[in-house]
């Protein structure tokens, strides 16, 4: 991986972590809990919550990429994680 890409990934990760943390504080709920509540129909879908879930999934993918891109202490195999961004209704 190029240094430039790694720097961009770190910046994006920081941005996503900050945004996800703001959502979690606002709704007083961890992202996994919100995802489950939306999937179960316990929470109503709103544009704000869907943006939150998009950011949360993007952060998970970046975390997974960091673990599998060959950085020190991480496996070098490809990721098998996939994310479905379909509507939860």
Image: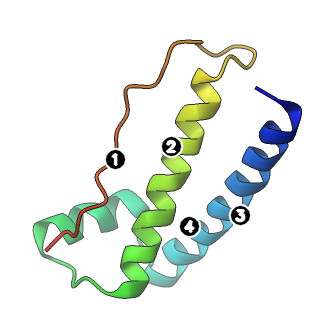
Lower position in the chain sequence, tag 4 or tag 2: 4
Of the residues tagged 3 and 4, which is closer to the observer? 3
Q: Position of residue 61 (x, y in %)?
A: 50, 43
The answer to whether residue 7 of the structure is visible from this angle is yes
Of the residues tagged 1 and 3, which is closer to the observer? 1
- Helix or strand or loop: what does disc 4 sit on? helix
State the residue position of label 3.
15
How far apart marks 2 and 3 lie (CA) works out to 14 Å
The answer to whether residue 30 of the structure is visible from this angle is no
State the residue position of label 4.
20
Q: Is 9 left, or right, of 85 in this rendering?
A: right
Residue depicted at x 52% and y 13%: 77
Of the residues tagged 4 and 2, which is closer to the observer? 2
Vertical position of residue 88 compared to residue 56: above or below: below
Residue depicted at x 48% and y 59%: 56
State the residue position of label 1.
83
Residue depicted at x 71% and y 63%: 15
- Helix or strand or loop: what does disc 1 sit on? loop
Taking depth in this image into account, of 86 and 60 the one nearest to the observer is 86
Lower position in the chain sequence, tag 1 or tag 2: 2
Judge the density around disc 1: few (<14), some (14-19), many (≥20) Cα neighbours within 10 Å: few
């Amino acid at each position: 991986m190029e240094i430039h890409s790694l720097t961009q990934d770190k910046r994006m990760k920081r941005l996503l972590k900050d945004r996800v943390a703001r959502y979690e504080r606002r709704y007083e709920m961890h992202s996994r809990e919100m995802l489950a509540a939306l999937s179960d129909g316990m929470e109503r879908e709103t544009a704000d919550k869907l943006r939150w879930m998009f950011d949360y999934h993007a952060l998970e993918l970046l975390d997974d990429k960091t673990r599998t891109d060959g950085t020190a202490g991480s496996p070098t195999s490809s990721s098998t994680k996939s994310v479905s961004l379909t509507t939860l209704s």
